[in-house]
Amino acid sequence: MLRRNSINRICSMKDGSFILTILVFILISCNSDDAPVSLPIEIPQARDCASTHPLVGESRRLRVSTSYGIRGRATVISDCEIQLTNFFYNGSGPAVSLYGGTNGNFDKGIPLSEPIQGRRFEDETLRVFLPEGTSLDEINSISIWCFQFNIDFSSASFE
């Protein structure tokens, strides 16, 4: 009975405390000092490719994240390359990588970089590449992604 009353009390909070509690839990989880989780696949390597896709030259600002000090601009450089410029990130989070996704969805996205947590970025330029055989029709969004907890810290979509 105590458990049911506790659950009912938590779920009936009308002032947003429940949602705030969940958000705090997520932020604490993604700032833990646990050992980083390894990436599941090989990271795409730098290469030359054509510049024929309609998204080439498109540029978007990353959504600002004050919690992680993230800001910058993502630009499609070629059919297989996205470049981040003026990139800032405070390095926190247990397992963070640049991820590619489709239409802003990164749950089934792919890592485009080695893990970047633990390293502070201040006004830097990063280049990432799509995997061989993958097009900008399949990967048209980029995220600074906590892959241990599947959380989008910041992203930009070219859709």
Image (spheres, helix red, strand yellow):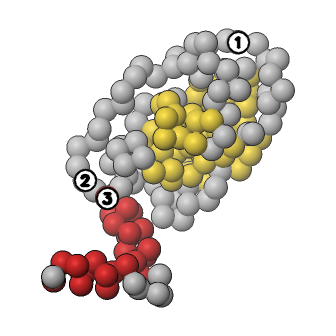
What amino acid is labelled 1 in the image? Cys
Q: Secondary structure at mark 1?
A: loop
Measured from the top left, where is residue 94 in percent x and y?
33, 48
Q: CA distance from mark 3 to mark 1?
A: 39 Å
Q: CA distance from mark 3 to mark 2?
A: 9 Å
Labels 3, 1: front one: 3
Residue 128 picture quarter: top right
Residue 119, visible in the rendered structure: no
Labels 3, 2: front one: 3
Residue corresponding to mark 2: 33
Query: Of the residues under marks 3 and 1, which one precedes in the sequence?
Result: 3
Q: CA distance from mark 2 to mark 1?
A: 39 Å
Residue corresponding to mark 1: 49
Residue corresponding to mark 3: 29
Measured from the top left, where is residue 22 in percent x and y?
38, 69
**Relative to 36, is 79 on the left or the right?**
right
Whether pointer 2 and pointer 1 mark residues with C-beta atoms closer than 8 Å, the reply is no
Q: Secondary structure at mark 3?
A: helix
Of residues 134 and 85, which is closer to you in this image? 134
Q: Residue at x 76, y 13 (%)?
A: 50
Q: Is residue 13 above or below residue 80?
A: below
Callout 2 crowding tier (Cα within 10 Å): few <14, some 14–19, many ≥20: few
**Relative to 133, is 44 on the left or the right?**
left
The quarter of the image holding the N terminus is: bottom left
**Relative to 142, is 40 on the left or the right?**
left
What amino acid is labelled 3 in the image? Ser
Measured from the top left, where is residue 60 in percent x and y?
74, 45
